[in-house]
Image: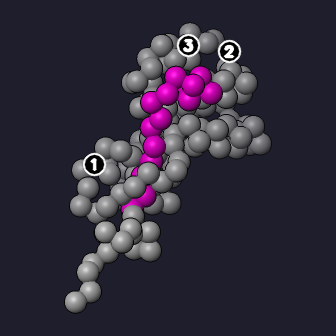
Amino acid sequence: GVLSAETLLENPAAFAGFRTAEWAKDNEEEGFVDGGLDQGDLVVEYLKLCEKHPVPWRMIRSHVHKMLGEWFRIHPQVREQLNAQNILTFEFLYGLVDQLRELGGRVPLYKKKKIDTLTPQDSPQRV
C-alpha cells in the first residue's frame, strides 16, 4: 500500500501528472515546466465542489490549510487570518485565495515537458 492522503492534499493534481516545485526540483533531469496550475486554482475548484456536496467546515478548514501550505509559508499573516476566523464562509475562503494572489509569490505545479513542446535548441541534432 501507499500512503497518499497528505501528498494529495498538498497536490490534488498529482494523479494528473502535476508535481510540486520541490518534487520537480529533485527530479530536474526529467525536464519539468510550469504546468499553468497552482494550489490556488485547486482550492477554488475544491471549494466549488464543497458548495455542491456539503462537507463539514472543520474538514474544509483543514484541507485549505494543507492545500495552501506553501503560500502560507510565504505569507503567514494570511494563514493567521484563517486561524482567527471562527465562522468560515465560502466568500471568506475565496477572498483568502484572491488575497494570496494579490500578494504574489505564486506556487505553481509542474508537468513533465512533452517531446512536442521542445524548442529547436532542445531537439537532438540530426546527422
Is-magenta flag for residue 94?
no
Q: Is residue 5 visible?
A: no
Side of 17 relative to 25 (left or right): right
Q: Which mark is residue 87?
A: 2
Instruction: Between residue 118 and residue 70, name the one nearer to us.
Output: 118
User: Of the residues tagged 2 and 3, which is closer to the observer?
Assistant: 3
For the residues labelled 1 and 3, the Cα–Cα distance comes to: 31 Å
For the residues labelled 2 and 3, the Cα–Cα distance comes to: 12 Å
Amino acid bearing label 2: Ile
Circle 1 SS class: helix
Q: Identify the residue at horizontal 26%, vertical 81% (top origin).
A: 125
Location of mark 3 (residue): 81
Quadrant hosting residue 91: top right
Side of 112 relative to 78 (left or right): left
Q: Which residues are magenta?
A: 98-112
User: Of the residues tagged 2 and 1, which is closer to the observer?
Assistant: 1
Sequence-first disc among 1 and 3: 1
Q: Position of residue 11 (x, y in %)?
A: 46, 46
- Above or below — where is 42 with respect to 90? below
Is-magenta flag for residue 106?
yes
Q: Identify the residue at horizontal 52%, vertical 17% (top origin).
A: 78
Q: Identify the residue at horizontal 41%, vertical 32% (top origin).
A: 70
* 2 and 3 marks in contact (CB < 8 Å): no
Q: Which mark is residue 4?
A: none
Q: Identify the residue at horizontal 60%, vertical 29% (top origin).
A: 97
Sequence-first disc among 2 and 3: 3
10 Å neighbourhood of mark 2: few (<14), some, or many (≥20)?
Answer: few
Location of mark 1 (residue): 25
10 Å neighbourhood of mark 3: few (<14), some, or many (≥20)?
Answer: few
User: Of the residues tagged 1 and 3, which is closer to the observer?
Assistant: 1
Amino acid bearing label 1: Lys
